Image (tube, rainbow, N blue to C red):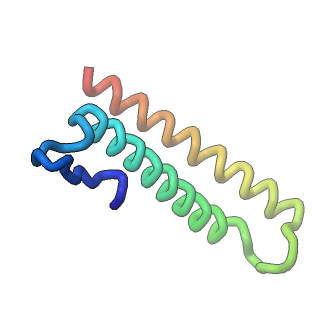
Amino acid sequence: MDSFSTGSSGTGSPQISTDEFMDQMKVQLAQAYAQEFLETVREKCFDKCITKPGSSLSGSESSCISRCVDRYIEATGIIGRALLSAQR
């Protein structure tokens, strides 16, 4: 049984409360978002910065990846803050 299964205790009532279920959903969504973010950054930054894949990164490739990741993190923060302020 996965973490979202409610099952029954013989009376037909759920084993977890709605609040617990919502907390689990929030955790799962945050994990999925983080995984998607990392995959996107890895793909975009790799495509942009790695011109000749090899066994190690050159200095310029390493710098490019670092700047690329920093920009994605900064952009995500800006978007997050804008969405938060729009909800208020």
Give the residue at the far left of this rendering. 12
Identify the residue at image location x=41%, y=43%.
Answer: 27
Residue 71 image position (x, y, % from top left)? 61, 45
Identify the residue at image location x=30%, y=35%.
Answer: 20
Give the residue at the far front of this rendering. 10
Residue 40 image position (x, y, % from top left)? 52, 61
Instruction: Examine the rendered structure and indicate whether residue 46 appears above or below residue 31.
Output: below
- Observer-nearest of 31 and 40: 31
Of the 4 image quadrants, the one containing the C terminus is top left
Q: Would residue 2 appear left or right of 63 to someone viewing this image?
A: left
Instruction: Examine the rendered structure and indicate whether residue 83 appears above or below residue 26.
Output: above
- Observer-nearest of 25 and 78: 25
Residue 36 image position (x, y, % from top left)? 47, 58
Residue 61 image position (x, y, % from top left)? 80, 63
- Observer-nearest of 8 and 27: 8
Identify the residue at image location x=23%, y=50%.
Answer: 6
Q: Would residue 40 appear left or right of 58 to someone viewing this image?
A: left
Give residue 45's quadrant in the image: bottom right
State the count of labels: 0
Q: Would residue 19 appear left or right of 32 to someone viewing this image?
A: left
Identify the residue at image location x=23%, y=35%.
Answer: 17
Of the 4 image quadrants, the one containing the N terminus is bottom left
